[in-house]
Amino acid sequence: MAIVERPEPAKRESAERPIRIFLNEVPVAVSQGSPFGLSELAVGYLLSEGLIADRDSLVEVVEVPEEAAVYVASGERAEEGYVPLHRVTSAGCAQSALLRDARRAGEPRALETAARFDADDLLACMEELCERSPRRNTGACVHGCGLGAAGSDELLLVREDIGRHNAMDKLVGQAWLDRVDVRDKALFITGRISCEMALKAYRAGCPVLVSRKSATDEAVRRAEELGVTLASHCRDGRIRVLSRSERVTG
């Protein structure tokens, strides 16, 4: 017999809000996502869009929660003619200017790294991500994203959001704010790997992207071109390495 639950109103759903992101007072995007970790979300989004890159040029990041807005001030500015592909990015599978620019730019330089990642370490980090995702473990509808170093079976950072794109933006944004070098690190996500997720990992400079779920064929193709190792179905003692497999040992 089915069990019917009727939770209190405050516990029924995960919070979702439109988050406005500004760069030097100019509105850049409105991202649908969880209303926490707004600074890291904004910074990660701007990094993935290629609008900022130099940590020393960052002036400040100011959250205004009552406005659901984040104001980023930087010495870097968007190139003339930059127009976001979508003013509003959804919590689901929104396409950003990142994908458009990647197609237009031709063949970019592939990521290179001497780092090697043990398969058992990757499995342990994914298991830790699932255990350390606090809102996810209370039944909230969120995705988790973690960061782990080569040679370690423990995560350095964990972030969450209702959208898998936002979860990665938050993780990458926080690592960048903390000046964490990700060139010998792996990103872990609980959601599937789409082409845009592979491109976000590339823009972040992270050579390995691991998912508990599946990956699309376009994500695998682009990852191979960009020098990103994609690994899917990381669970139950198994892992599928789909591109640049030489970086995964064991």
Image (cartoon, grey):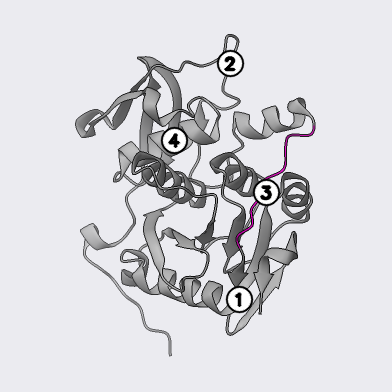
Query: Tags 3 and 4 in contact by the CB under 8 Å rule?
Result: no
Q: Which residue is mark 4?
A: 31
Distance of mark 4 from mark 1, alpha carbons? 34 Å
Q: Secondary structure at mark 3?
A: loop
Please state the extent of the stretch shown in magenta in the rendering. 107-115
Residue 194 pos. (x, y %):
66, 51
* Numbered disc in front, either 3 or 1: 3
Disc 1 target residue: 119
First-in-chain label (4 vs 2): 4
The crowding category of the residue bearing disc 2, from other C-alpha atoms within 10 Å (few below 14, some 14 to 19, many at least 20), is few
Q: Residues within 10 Å of mark 3 (few under 14, many from 20)?
A: some
Q: Identify the amino acid type marked 1.
A: Ala
Nearest-to-viewer mark from 4 and 1: 1
Is disc 4 placed on a helix, strand or loop?
A: strand
The relative height of residue 80 versus residue 127 in the rendered view (above or below) is above
Residue bearing the label numbered 3: 112
110 magenta-colored: yes
Quadrant location, the N terminus: bottom left
Mark 3 and mark 4: Cα distance apart in space: 31 Å
